[in-house]
Every structure is written in C-alpha cells, then in structure tokens.
Image: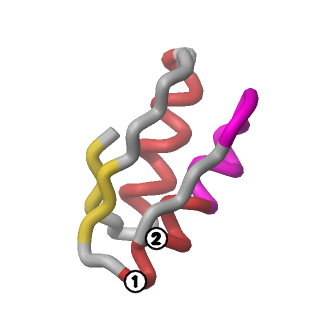
Amino acid sequence: MTSFVFGRTGVNTIVGKIRDLAVHNRAVILLYFGQLTLQQKREIGRAVHENELAVAI
C-alpha cells in the first residue's frame, strides 16, 4: 500500500498516515522529503512507540 502527502505536512498528519498504513502492514517505511524539527521527530517517535508501530523514517 502506498500513500502520498504533499505540501507542508504537520506531525498529526504524518502520524495519522503511519497509523493508517500500519493497519494493513506489519511495518511502514516513510519517505519524508521535508525538514522536521527535533521536537517534531520526538512527537512522531512518541506516537509510534505508544501505538507499538514498526516504522522507519
């Protein structure tokens, strides 16, 4: 399953897409071609950990 998000994407949108993809797949590889602040990276990491998702960004 492939999902694309264009434009300036917020952390909530990224985490939502990860959750959606994780429902159908055991692991998710996310290619993000923008810049994330350290805080945004931590928020994504926290959400991934809390939801027990396997993700590579």
Q: Secondary structure at mark 2?
A: helix
Q: Quadrant of the N terminus?
A: bottom left
Q: How far apart are the two marked residues, 1 and 2, measured between alpha carbons?
A: 6 Å
At label 1, which amino acid type do we have?
Answer: His
Q: Which residues are magenta?
A: 6-16
Q: Where does the C terminus fall, quadrant-wise?
A: top left
Image-based side of 24 in relation to 44, left or right: left
12 within the magenta span: yes
Badge 1 is on which residue? 24
Q: Position of residue 2 (x, y in %)?
A: 45, 63
Check disc 2: other Cα within 10 Å, few if <14, some if 14-19, many if 20+.
some
Q: What residue is rendered at 64% in x and 46% in y?
A: 5
53 in relation to 24, above or below = above
Under mark 2, the amino acid is Leu
Checking the image for residue 7, the label placed there is none
* Residue at 50%, 17% in the rendered image: 38
Residue 53 drawn at (x, y percent) = 34, 66
Give yes or no for contact between labels 1 and 2 (Cβ–Cβ under 8 Å). yes
Let me know if residue 33 is in the magenta part.
Answer: no
Read off the residue under disc 2. Answer: 21
**Measured along the vertical axis of the image, is residue 38 above or below residue 31?**
above
Question: Which residue is at 37% across, 57% downward?
Answer: 49
Q: Is residue 21 above or below residue 28?
A: below
SS type, badge 1: helix
**Image location (x, y in percent) of residue 6:** 69, 38
The residue sitting at 39% across, 38% down in the picture is 31
Give the percent coordinates (x, y) of residue 44. 50, 43
Q: Quick check: 9 left or right of 3?
A: right
